[in-house]
Amino acid sequence: MKLILAAVLSIAAAPAVAFAASQADLARIAMDERNDVAIRVAAVNHLKDQALLEQVALSPSKIWTVDYYQNGHPSPPRYTDDVKCGPGYWQCIVGQLREQDESVKRAAIARLTDQPLLMKIAMTADDNEVGYAVPYEAVNKLTDQAALANVALKAKSSYARNSAVRRVTDQAVLARVALNAKEEYPIRDGAIENLIDQAVLAQIAIDPLNNFNVRNEAEKKLTDETAIEKFALEDVPPQGTEGGYFRADDGPCGWWSRRDAIQKVANQEVLLRIAQDTEAEASFRTVAVASLEDSASLKLLAEDETLEINSPIRSIARLKLAITEPRMVARLGKIRASVTVEMITQPYVDNNKLTQSTMAGEIIEVSLVGPTETLVQQSWRTEFPQGVSSLEHRHLIEANLSIETTLARLFQLPAFTQEDLVELSASAMPEVRNAALASRKKPWIRSF
């Protein structure tokens, strides 16, 4: 109904404003907030003077002050839809008034073609006076890269800078914005979006003083192996806060950023360093061993008695060694262990403070993949306690893996004969021996 009324008013108003004495009169009608919005838009649609259109676009309005209709300020104009908002809902009312003001200013910018005037609007518009759409729309009509670069670097409105930087192609300008620690991080993210300079991306990603969101965005675009390795090796203090365990932004670079970097590392020596780093978060070490393929490195982890026998790090290493047994390869061909590690969280009651906090765990999924198909899949999930002290669980609670069950499933494939199982029962690896023995004693497990 409101839209129909506005359309009728607009049609009725058009002839009247067309007879206005001058372009200046039309501008005054458009900027007078006491006028119905349909009349104001109709006035704008008859404006041709580019300078006056610029004045309309930049005309300040009190409705962009957040608390304008709070604390006893006079009621909004009559055309506000009070029924929709309900009496007293000033946030909704102000929101409607802002939409109406924006529709007038958008109409003005739509008729502007003068690039210097559009540049002036983009550079000087104040979000608290004209709203957010004005600088944004003005930037969208700019065509000159030099103008866009200037707006991205110097515009008063953060919306203008954000819109401009996403259209800038000059790598030097993008680098200046991305490296500016004083700039708001969404704008720095916008610069990183189009940044291809690996040296600059590495500088942003590795700098521990940068906002973790910015570092994360830079890390995602890193392709330089040296930079990725340096980032992956960066020390991240154990997670944990006074209020509980898990925060994605704990540590100087953020948990997710470093995890992503580790997943990109191909250098086996670097992966081994991370996997053996007893000061590192356990989840980082697990992600590292998930990508590790070097048999000598896997053997070091498999025989590391400082690790629990069912810990993910040791279990994954031992599974990767187990599937290289000659009898398995003879029957199934080369087998590859594909490992994914997913972070999960769960609320818990802090027994010390009687408050609810959050602890982190993991889901580890292993797929044994043959030359042509996936042979076996199995997953393990952290078993969370119901009530603990916040001091007990500042670190990730690891899942307990049992690779014997994975191997037992593998041995139930039709490719394995009883003779194979007898030979595998004599394996030097206890997990292989136990799985083979269990399969020999329980042939019905083939329906596992």
Image: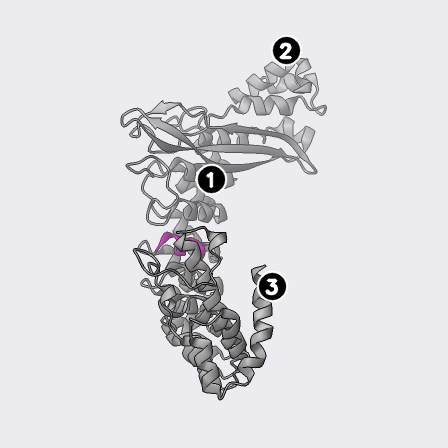
Task: Name the amino acid type tagged 1.
Answer: Val
Residue 217 part of the magenta-drawn span: yes
Horizontal placement of 72 versus 132: left or right? Answer: left
Q: Nearer the viewer, residue 212 or 328?
A: 212
Residue 231 part of the magenta-drawn span: no
Give, as a single range, the part of the protein colored magenta. 211-219
- Report, in whole angstroms, how far the alpha carbon at label 1 lies from the one at label 2: 35 Å
Percent of width and height locating residue 47 = 52, 83
Task: Name the amino acid type tagged 2.
Answer: Lys
Whichever of callouts 1 and 3 sits on the residue coming sooner in the sequence is: 3
Q: Quadrant of the C terminus?
A: top right
Percent of width and height locating residue 417 = 70, 19
Labelled disc at residue 287: 1
Which residue is the site of mark 2?
Answer: 441
Q: Estimate how packed mark 2 is, as few (under 14), some (14 to 19) or many (20 or more) residues with alpha carbons within 10 Å.
A: few
Q: Estimate how packed mark 3 is, as few (under 14), some (14 to 19) or many (20 or more) residues with alpha carbons within 10 Å.
A: few
Which residue is the site of mark 3?
Answer: 4
Horizontal placement of 426 versus 96: left or right? Answer: right
Labelled disc at residue 304: none
